[in-house]
Amino acid sequence: MAIQRTFVGLPSPALGRAGAGGHPCQGVYYEPTGKKPKVAVIATHYNIDFSEHYIATYLVERGIAFLGWNTRFRGDEAHFLLDHALVDIGVGVRWLKEEAGVDTVILLGNSGGGSLMSAYQSQALEPNVTPLEGMRPAKGLEDLLPGDGYISTAAHLGRPDVLTAWSDGAVLDEADPFDTDPTLDLFNPDNGPSYGAEFLVRYRQAQVDRNHRITRWVKAELVRAREAGHYDRFFAFNRAWADPRMVDPTIEPTRREPNLCYAGVPERANKSIFSIAGSCTLRTWLGLWSLEDSQTRALPHLARITQPALVINGDADTGVFPSDAQGFYDGLASTDKELHEVHADHYFLLPGARDLQADMITEWIDKRFG
């Protein structure tokens, strides 16, 4: 099948075209050449460029259009603002309805996008998202068109949730990434693997405590910044590849490869400079990564979604686990929802996995919207 790709660049109600010419909202629209599909899927992420998302051509080959959509924060998660991102997503949804001639829009939340798209649908149905303290709501925040259905695939339950689950609980001092509590060191052979129940309880609590500790520091630092006449500041987050499940396959057993994470071997990755939340501002921490303050946690938003919903998870994923998928399924308010587990890694690169995922999505859409 011939596939037509159209670049779409649009202004946002909250931000116009940049001086150099770029639009804040950009993406690629995929459709069969010579045909106008009535159903389209839109996918967006907090940070990753989804304009060339792998599932696009698979869905178009099955008669479903696809918009790989980016907000102004693509590649710039360090400055992320949820209310502005939701407005930018709304530009894509509205374009599909009003310009592309699509009758049905399905929101696809992949990986980190699972919680982001749940927040969009939640806000469109029942406005609840508030701006960061001291900021005005993004223009257009209460004028979002809801999607007609919601899909979660290989998705985390939120930026604070995934960061906390992956963070190194043995860190003692955020200003010193080498300072470690050996009794909580995941990579200390005296502790495991395999890890005992007592160690895991202490470790998980230490991860939560670390998140809260940073939040307390951030709030105090914001006060200090204001007193010094500043608005914000950057800081670094280190050691974010230390989820015990990455190392010990007996915790939430699946068909995943042991001692592996998205950045390679966890112990080595944990000491590298490549990680989520590596560069933050104080305000971005509160808006994106804080367990206490962030509105990017999926569960409160899922509780407002009553549209048909589909949850797909891969049993060889080294960063998303069965409890994540079950959390999405249980959290959805929809009475028409399905949960499927397939043999796939995070990017569905295993042989046949992408075709299987596309078939499941297509069958689910045809049954409800065909």
Image: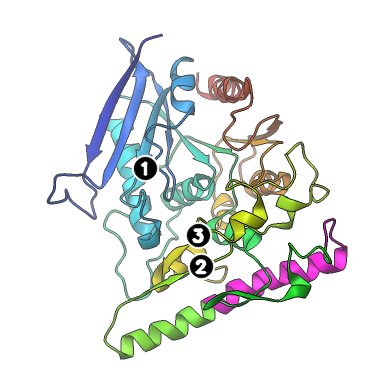
Q: Residue at x 19, y 44 (%)?
A: 22
| 341 w.r.t. 167: above or below | above
Mark 2 or mark 3: whose residue is earlier in sequence: 2
* Mark sitting on residue 273: 3
Furthest-bottom residue in view? 227
The percent coordinates of residue 322 (x first, y second) are 72, 44
Magenta residues, start to end: 192-214
Mark 1 or mark 2: whose residue is earlier in sequence: 1
Magenta stretch secondary structure, dominant:
helix
Task: Describe the element under mark 3 as helix, strand or loop.
Answer: loop
Question: Is residue 188 or residue 35 the one in the foreground?
Answer: 188
The percent coordinates of residue 144 (x first, y second) are 35, 47
Q: Quadrant of residue 4?
A: top left
Q: Residue at x 37, y 42 (%)?
A: 145
Q: Identify residue type, mark 3.
A: Ile
| 33 w.r.t. 362: above or below | above
Viewer-side label of 2, 3: 3
Q: Identify residue type, mark 1.
A: Leu
- Marks 1,3: beta carbons within 8 A: no
Residue pointed to by mark 1: 145
Magenta run includes residue 321: no
